[in-house]
Image: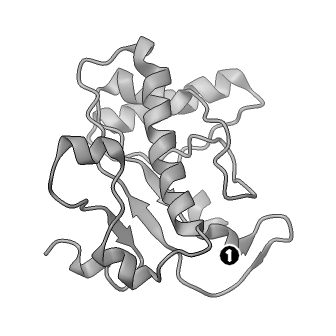
Amino acid sequence: GASIKNSPSVFIDRSHPKKSVESMQIAGERIQKGLSVAIFPEGSRSHSTQIQEFKRGAFILAIAAGVPVVPVTILNALELFNEKTRLARPGTMHIVIGKPINIDGWTRKDIPRLMGLVRDVMQGELDSWNRPNALPLRIRYLYPPQSATSRRMSKKPSRTARVASPRAADQNT
């Protein structure tokens, strides 16, 4: 609420296209100054474990700025905060910070491909988290899942950080 309104956040008003463009320009200026910008590509909160359709704005901005895209997946927000009833409960929110996707040389024609890559990474993390027979979080850290793409690119284990979990500090060892 108040804390995010007082932060340097940039809000997109989709009901006013001109204001949306201005907000994206502000975000672009911040990226050019070297600041990181977090954008929720769905444009709104999801009420399920399935990712909604992505909006193109975040990807247009990334390609225009020429900066890597880092998929960030919030795994259990639905368990902690019910958007419909506005009720929150205590707990640990688990977040996966994926590997940066280098987009050097990519153009606007590559936006659908970039959107698909990010969506696949994020949905894979959600599917893994929500599997009925999923291993407890600590055990999954010892054997992190790898996508087919990451297996082809490297024989090293995935170094995906899972923020806000007891094992996050062990990630960089």
Above or below, 121 against 66 in this view is below
User: Closer to the camera, 70 or 38?
Assistant: 70
Q: Position of residue 132 (x, y in %)?
A: 62, 73
Q: Position of residue 169 (x, y in %)?
A: 25, 80
Q: State the residue at coordinates (56%, 46%).
A: 40
Q: Position of residue 157 (x, y in %)?
A: 20, 61
User: Closer to the camera, 123 or 18?
Assistant: 123
The residue that mark 1 highlights is: 79
Quadrant of res 48:
bottom right
Above or below, 123 against 88 in this view is above
Q: Can I make out residue 2 in this image? A: yes
Q: State the residue at coordinates (25%, 48%).
A: 151
Total label count?
1
Q: State the residue at coordinates (63%, 47%).
A: 51
The color scheme shown is one colour
Above or below, 28 against 79 in this view is above
Q: Can I make out residue 7 in this image? A: no
For this view, does 138 lie left or right of residue 103? Answer: right
Looking at the rendered structure, the kind of residue marked 1 is: Glu
Position of the N terminus, as image quadrant, is bottom right
